[in-house]
Image (tube, rainbow, N blue to C red):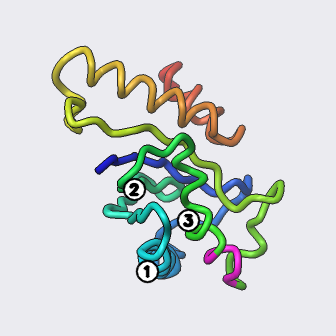
């Protein structure tokens, strides 16, 4: 089985906070996992974690390798787009922006030991920064400057 870590943020510049819509997210995960069982390549979301109020991490498991793991979550996104509470947060024809990477067995989740995990952490941070709204970038810049 292949596993992919997918970082998910709302595309809208003024999004709701994930804790406010957690019930819908959990429903979408259940819906996705049920629908995916009958797919040609069954997949499932095996883990969900709130990283901060505007970011969640999903772990997607698939029997086959996925060239575009974020695209494999269309059923998940489609379910959420149909929810009246979230329709107002569609921005640029999308609800979410996602970044994904394949999780390998040799790559530990613990980022505190070894250069490989430090490099993986740097790549994750860069990916998050590239997808961050301008407001978040300003906050990050202030933190890095030590203000």
Looking at the image, which residue sits at the far top?
A: 115
The mark total stands at 3
Instruction: Work out whether 125 lies above or below 47.
Output: above
Reply yes or no: does residue 82 show up in magenta: yes
Q: Nearer the viewer, mark 1 or mark 3?
A: 1
89 or 30: nearer the eye? 30
Looking at the image, which residue sits at the far bottom?
A: 84
- Tell me which corner region of the image, top left, top right, bottom left or bottom right, holds residue 136: top right
> What residue does disc 3 label?
17
> What residue does disc 2 label?
60
In the rendered structure, the answer to whether residue 14 lies left or right of residue 80 reads: right
26 or 73: nearer the eye? 73
Looking at the image, which residue sits at the far left?
A: 113
Residue 17 % position (x, y):
55, 65
In the rendered structure, the answer to whether residue 133 lies left or right of residue 43 reads: right
Find numbered disc 3 in the image and state the secondary structure of the residue it sits on: loop
Q: CA distance from mark 1 to mark 2?
A: 14 Å
> What residue does disc 1 label?
34
């Amino acid at each position: 089985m292949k596993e992919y870590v997918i970082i998910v943020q709302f595309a809208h510049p003024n999004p709701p906070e994930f804790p406010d819509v957690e019930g819908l997210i959990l429903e979408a995960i259940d819906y996705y996992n049920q629908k995916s069982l009958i797919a040609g390549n069954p997949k499932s979301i095996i883990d969900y974690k709130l990283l901060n109020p505007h970011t969640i991490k999903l772990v997607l498991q698939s029997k086959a390798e996925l060239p575009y793991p974020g695209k494999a979550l269309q059923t998940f996104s489609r379910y959420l787009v149909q929810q009246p509470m979230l329709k107002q947060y569609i921005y640029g024809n999308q609800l979410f922006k996602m970044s994904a990477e394949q999780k390998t067995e040799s790559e530990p989740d613990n980022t505190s030991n070894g250069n490989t995990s430090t490099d993986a952490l740097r790549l994750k941070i860069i990916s998050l920064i590239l997808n961050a709204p301008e407001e978040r970038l300003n906050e990050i810049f202030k933190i890095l400057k030590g203000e």
